[in-house]
Image (cartoon, helix red, strand yellow):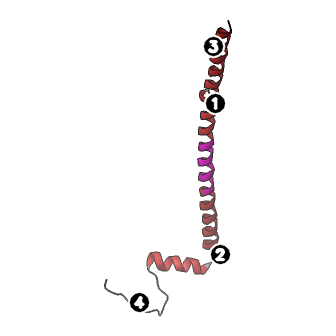
Amino acid sequence: MSKKYLVIILFFLFFILFFTAFGQQGIIHICRLVKERNQIVAFNEKVKEENRNLRETIYSLKKDRGYIEGIARKKFGLVKEGEIIYRFKE
């Protein structure tokens, strides 16, 4: 009789451990969710940093004439009146 109860108890323990690890809300599922959450948090931080940089760029474009001048010089090759341009062969 005691072996029968021991087998039944072990079966239930195995059953409980199995669902604790592999069930819908088991440990493995929770680990996957934590990993996914960490990836989302990292992505959000990256997007926040990009937004900060964009806000700074927008502010500079609205308020800083030197910034606009620098962009015009780099992107479009513009020069001020009276400046001398030197071109070097590569």
Q: Nearer the viewer, mark 3 or mark 1?
A: 3
Going by the picture, which residue comes out furthest to the left?
A: 89
The amino acid sitting under disc 2 is: Lys
Q: Is residue 16 above or below residue 45?
A: above
Task: Return the residue at label 1.
Answer: 26
Q: Which numbered circle lies on residue 7?
A: 3
Q: Given contact means CB atoms under 8 Å apart, are the residues at marks 4 and 1 in contact?
A: no
Q: Secondary structure at mark 3?
A: helix
Q: Earlier in the sequence, mark 4 or mark 1?
A: 1
Left or right, 79 with respect to 65, comes to left
The amino acid sitting under disc 3 is: Val
Q: Is residue 76 magenta?
A: no
Q: Which numbered circle lies on residue 85?
A: 4
Q: 38 or 2: which is nearer to us?
A: 2
Q: Earlier in the sequence, mark 2 or mark 1?
A: 1
Q: CA distance from mark 2 to mark 1?
A: 55 Å
Where residue 64 appears, as percent x and y from the top left, is 63, 77
Q: Nearer the viewer, mark 2 or mark 3?
A: 3
Where residue 13 appears, as percent x and y from the top left, is 66, 21
Q: Residues within 10 Å of mark 3 (few under 14, many from 20)?
A: few
Range of the magenta residues? 34-45
Q: Residue at x 50, y 77 (%)?
A: 72
Task: Return the residue at label 2.
Answer: 63
Where residue 58 appears, as percent x and y from the top left, is 62, 68
Q: Residues within 10 Å of mark 2 (few under 14, many from 20)?
A: few
